[in-house]
Image: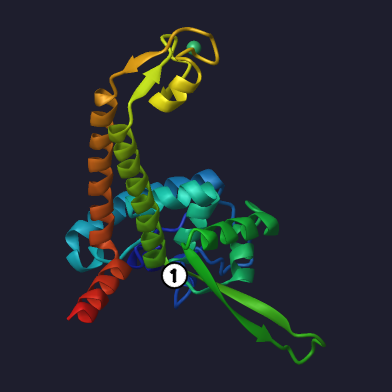
Amino acid sequence: GSAGQSAGFACACPVPAKQARGRAHPLVRTSPERCTASLADLLSEYTKNAEHGIAGEKKKKAKANKLTTYDPDIEEHILKIAGTNGLLMAEFLAHGPIKETDIVERFSPLMDRKEVHQALYALRDGKVANSTQETVRLPDKKNPWVQYSWYLTLDEALFHLFGKEQRVLRDLKLTVEYEKTNNFYACPSRCMKMTFDKAYSVGFRCPNCGAEMSYLDNNPAIDNLKKAACMQEMLCGEIESRCEICRARQSLQKKRSR
Ligand SMILES: [Zn+2]
């Protein structure tokens, strides 16, 4: 419907456009009928929107600065931590904060309450989403209950991702140093390789097959590790350049060093 398109999202749900208006996301069911879209329908809709989103982002430069679930790094991260369910849920939360009861209702019967919870908590653990809570009291109910509302925290997610990739980079650099500063001996059957000290302690015999171990030229391995570290450094720089929190921290450090 037109309401959906203006929000950059076309709904796979058979909800009339005129009902999907106001602050509600077009995927929020406003009709009493159950949502009949399957998970596959939603996913193909998501893919279409992703393509549309990328084209739209090129047109609108301002919009390109805003992180969305269509950002390739963010999307990959979400799929890794929360799977397809998590990705669909994150896309839905883009118009958040959305009450948890509404999320559960929206994804029923595709996912039961437990699956919705699992996806939401996986998103929270990956810094993709967070929730606020409020205590709700109804006059006709004796006990109040806690109502959770969920919203996206994609800047935090990108910063989390940056930290993760930075650790991979640090480990790669440490491995390069380790390879450069040690001499290695290897079994001809490639059972294992070990440092000189370790090889000396086993009499240069492979503990697995008993073959004589010989000196291993690890320069090709070092070259490959260096290439990997270089690629990783580029990835880190690329994420850092888009990361709001990285930028904020950098300017804070600059102020402090003045
Ligand atoms: Zn061996």
- The colour scheme used to paint the residues is rainbow
Instruction: Classify 14 as above or below 138.
Output: above
Tell me where residue 137 appears, x and y as whole percent: 72, 88
* Whether residue 241 is visible: yes
Q: In which quadrant is the C terminus drawn?
A: bottom left
Q: Quadrant of residue 187?
A: top left
Please tell me which residue is depicted at 64% across the width and 53% down the height of the picture. 111
- The residue that mark 1 highlights is 95
Instruction: Classify 39 as above or below 31.
Output: above
Given the current orientation, which residue lies at the most extreme right position? 142
Tell me where residue 197 appears, x and y as whole percent: 42, 27
Helix, strand, or loop for circle 1? loop
Please tell me which residue is depicted at 38% across the width and 19% down the height of the picture. 185
* Whether residue 195 is visible: no
Please tell me which residue is depicted at 33% across the width and 50% down the height of the picture. 72
Q: Quadrant of residue 61?
A: bottom left
Q: In which quadrant is the N terminus drawn?
A: bottom left
Say whether residue 192 is left or right of residue 48: right
Which of 55 and 84 lies nearest the eye of the viewer?
Answer: 84
Given the current orientation, which residue lies at the most extreme top position? 211
Say whether residue 181 is left or right of residue 164: left
Say whether residue 220 is left or right of residue 75: left
Say whether residue 163 is left or right of residue 81: left
Mark 1: few, some, or many residues within 10 Å (few <14, many ≥20)?
Answer: some
Which of 13 and 86 lies nearest the eye of the viewer?
Answer: 86
Instruction: Classify 102 as above or below 47.
Output: below
